[in-house]
Amino acid sequence: MAARPADRDPDGGPVTGHTVGIVGAGAVGQTVAALLVGEPWCNRLLVTSRTAENAAGLVADLDDMTHVVHSDTRAHAATVAELDQADALVICPRAGFTNTATRNVRMAGLDANAPLIAELGRKLTGFTRPIIMVTNPVDVLSRLLATISGAPTYGIGSATDTARYRAALAAHHRVPVSAVDGYVIGEHGDGAVTCASTTTVHGNPCTVPLELIRAELADRPRRINAGIGRTRHGPAAAVLSALRKLLNVEDGTDVLSVNGGGVWLGIRLHIRAGRPTVQPLTLDPHETAGLLTARTKLQAAYSQISHYEQGARACL
């Protein structure tokens, strides 16, 4: 991918604010785009999808939205090559396959989605700005895209898990979600690690009914999928939260999938001035063992698709 040119809008005038590229015009891509229309710091969206018709349809729908809500954000259909104009990318395409798994549901998309992400990684080689990965299995595919493209890549799975954990624990203790400070790290999937030992409510240690919480974390996406087809709003909000921080709109803490000793997995990051630093959590022995199990599982999953790296090198 070529170096990014000076920002210009389609009419040749200067662009102010941020440009975000969205790859995939499905459920999550549509929701991310709609959220970004309401963000004053985002003035341009570049949308690409499996077909030009999909991208054009979403752009037209977003154009209607911007006029109704009086937004200055403008959306444009784009090719992958034109994404070099973006300050950040959101990757959320999904291959066409039927997921019949009842366990390790997110990992079930590995074989179908890996070639799609590998091809995209080859096209994005040389991109140097933040990339947010949504496509599952998000931890493994974040690593694949980062390895092939060389771009800084962040997966949003553990951010969604953390939000669900806090909501479930707040309901259990009958407190506002804002009173709960706790994290879910590791794999976005069955190997997620609930950091109960450091969780607090109103700043104080609390009891965490782990079996109840784990059951809720596993069942919640199933209920969503059964009701509306697939999750969209929660992951899209996690994308928005990460973009705000990585584009230096605000400072804060997020749990994102990044390189942790060669394996991409959910890690707590403090992001200041757009720059993330690892903010390690103190884990008890059970949590430490869980994280090690997640690392082993994610490494094994990546070994199944690592041959795409060789294919990418052959194309260079």
Image (cartoon, grey):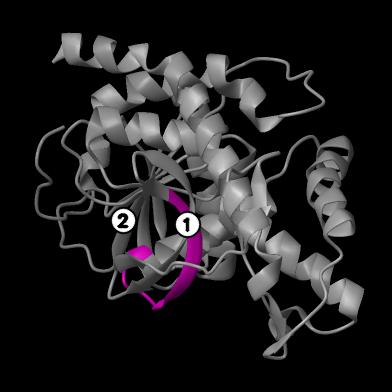
Position of residue 80 in the picture relative to residue 189 (left or right): left
Q: Residue at coordinates 27% horizontally, 27% vertically from top-left?
A: 148
Say whether residue 250 is magenta: yes
Q: Is residue 64 visible?
A: no
Identify residue for label 2. 19
Position of residue 205 in the picture relative to residue 23 (left or right): right
Quadrant location of the N terminus? top left
Front residue of 32 and 250: 250
Q: Height in image: 288 above or below 298?
A: below
Front residue of 7 and 94: 94
Q: Height in image: 222 above or below 253?
A: above
Identify residue for label 1. 267
Q: In the figure, residue 72 lies in which quadrant?
A: bottom left
Q: Residue at coordinates 39% horizontally, 78% vertically from top-left?
A: 251
Magenta range: 246-257
Position of residue 65 in the picture relative to residue 72 (left or right): right
Circle nearer the viewer, 2 or 1: 1
Q: Residue at coordinates 19% horizontally, 46% vertically from top-left?
A: 128
Please report whichever mark, 2 or 1, sits nearer to the chain's N-terminal start. Answer: 2
Task: Name the element at disc 2.
Answer: strand
| Separation of residues labelled 2 and 1 (CA atoms) | 27 Å
